[in-house]
Image (cartoon, helix red, strand yellow):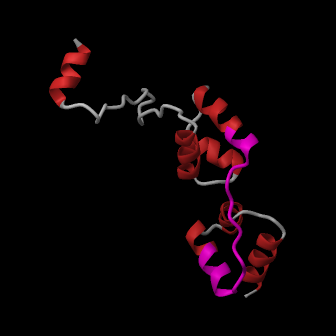
Amino acid sequence: MGCQRDLVEGYLAGATVYQLAEKFGISRATVSAILHRQEVPMRRQGLAVEQVDDAVYLYEQGWSLVRIGERHGVDPETVRQRLRARGVVMRDPQGNLRTTVDTTRSSGEREEALG
């Protein structure tokens, strides 16, 4: 029970669930479950405007979503969502820029537009 108390105290002191998961050697989901069982009010961890600016810059420099998320203490999916909201073109897992398909035209119209 002492470990759970330490975990709760760490969270209340400002540690993220990701930091606590690493510290205690458990998954993020387990940290969240313990906090919920202990009726600890969860705070939303997002990215501040300055952090999104930093994430855009780092992503454009070739950093991965995982690495950016680790830097800012958020999930890579949170980073992806914020980057997409800013209009950043995402890379595929091989690092190539993804192409977008114009869904407003039929395939024939798209072929004609491509020449």
Coordinates of residue 75 in the picture (x, y in percent): 59, 54
Image quarter of residue 23: bottom right
Q: Tell me if residue 43 is in the magenta stretch.
A: yes
Looking at the image, residue 89 lies above or below residue 13: above
Coordinates of residue 98 in the picture (x, y in percent): 40, 30
- Looking at the image, which residue is at 58% across and 74% down? 30
Observer-nearest of 99 and 95: 99
Observer-nearest of 91 and 85: 85
Observer-nearest of 101 and 97: 101
Instruction: Please provide the residue range marked out in magenta.
Output: 32-52
Query: How many numbered tags mark residues here?
Result: 0
Please state if 89 lies on the left or on the right of 51 as rendered. left
Coordinates of residue 8 in the picture (x, y in percent): 76, 78
| Residue 114 appears anywhere in the view | yes
Q: Quadrant of the N terminus?
A: bottom right
- Looking at the image, which residue is at 62% across and 74% down? 32
Please state if 31 lies on the left or on the right of 3 as rendered. left
Coordinates of residue 113 in the picture (x, y in percent): 25, 17
Residue projecting furthest to the top? 115
Q: Tell me if residue 44 is in the magenta stretch.
A: yes
Please state if 27 lies on the left or on the right of 99 as rendered. right
- Looking at the image, which residue is at 41% across and 34% down? 92
Image quarter of residue 83: top right
Looking at the image, residue 115 lies above or below residue 26: above
Q: Quadrant of the C terminus?
A: top left
Observer-nearest of 91 and 50: 50
Residue projecting furthest to the right? 13
| Residue 27 appears anywhere in the view | no
